[in-house]
Image: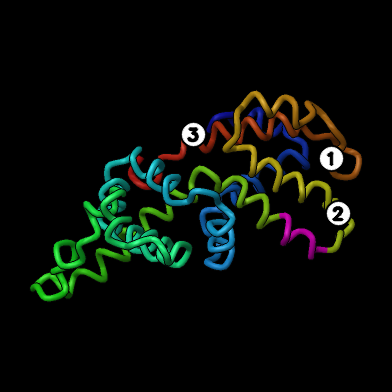
Amino acid sequence: FILGKKRIKQLSVADTWLLLQCAYAHDIGMSISAKDLISQMAEDNNIYNKVKAICQKEESAREAFEFIQPLFDYYLYNKKKEDCPEDDSDDYLARTSISQRLDAKAQYDIFSSNDFARWPIKLINAFTIILENYVRPRHGEFSENILSEDFAQICDNGIVPIRLRYLVARISSFHMKDRELLFEEFPKKTLGICKDYMNPRFDAIMLRLGDLLDLDNGR
C-alpha cells in the first residue's frame, strides 16, 4: 500500500523477508509472560509511582488505577510495618497520604453489597488495563528479549543467516525508540541472503511507518 507494486517488486529477497518478519513479530512484547512480567516489575525501582504516572495519561487507565489504589496502599502500609516495626502505625498513617484512602470499610463495603458479583470482574479488568499501559512503552524492548531468546535456540539453516534473525529482534526494539537512533544503529546497505543486499535502515523506518498506520483496536 505504501510502496506500491512497482517498488515492492524491486525489493531484494532479504528486504522482503526482513519486512515480513518484523511486521509479524515486532509486537510480541505485548504478550510478555507472567513470569517475565513479574521479573521486570520486581526490578523496576519505584514501581508504584511509575505505574501511577503512566496511568494518568489515559482516562480508562486512570480510572483503573483509582479502583485498585487501595490495594497498593495496603501493600505500602504493610511493607512499612515490616521494614519499620518500631514505627507506631497510627502515627505513620497520620504522616502519610495513605490515611486518606486506607479505610477498608469505606473503600470495600462492596463485599457486603449487591455489587459483590461484579467486583472480581472489575478488579481483573482494572489490572488488565494497568498492565497493558505498563507494558506498552517498553514492549519493543520486551520483543527484542523474547525474539533473541527464541533465535538463540535456532540453528542456522544455511538459507537465512542467524544474524538476520537477530536483526529482526533489534529492529523490533527500535520501533519504540527515538527515530534519530535508527540512523546510528542500522546501516543503509549491507549483505543480505546469499549474494543479495538489504537495507536495514529502510526496513526499520518502514516498520515504524506501518505501525503508525495500524488502525486496529479502534484507533
Mark 1 vs mark 2, CA separation in Å: 11 Å
Upstream in sequence: badge 1 or badge 2: 2
Question: Magenta stretch containing residue 153, yes or no?
Answer: yes
Amino acid marked by disc 3: Leu
- Colour scheme: rainbow
Secondary structure under tag 3 reads helix
- Give the class, few, some or many, for how many residues have Cα within 10 Å of label 1's Cα (few <14, many ≥20): many
Q: Which residues are magenta?
A: 148-154
Mark 3 vs mark 1, CA separation in Å: 26 Å
Q: Quadrant of residue 140?
A: top right
Mark 2 vs mark 3, CA separation in Å: 31 Å
Secondary structure under tag 2 reads loop
In the depicted structure, whether residue 21 falls above or below residue 209: below
Upstream in sequence: badge 3 or badge 1: 1
Amino acid marked by disc 1: Gly
Question: Label 3, on which residue?
Answer: 212
In the picture, which quadrant includes the C terminus? top left
* Residue pictured at 61% horizontal, 32% vertical: 206
* Residue pictured at 21% horizontal, 52% vertical: 100
Amino acid marked by disc 2: Ile
**Position of residue 155 measured from the top left corner of the image (x, y, whole percent):** 85, 63
**Position of residue 138 measured from the top left corner of the image (x, y, whole percent):** 55, 45
Q: Is residue 139 left or right of residue 100?
A: right
Secondary structure under tag 1 reads loop
Question: Label 2, on which residue?
Answer: 159
In the depicted structure, whether residue 134 falls above or below residue 116: above
Q: Quadrant of residue 4?
A: top right
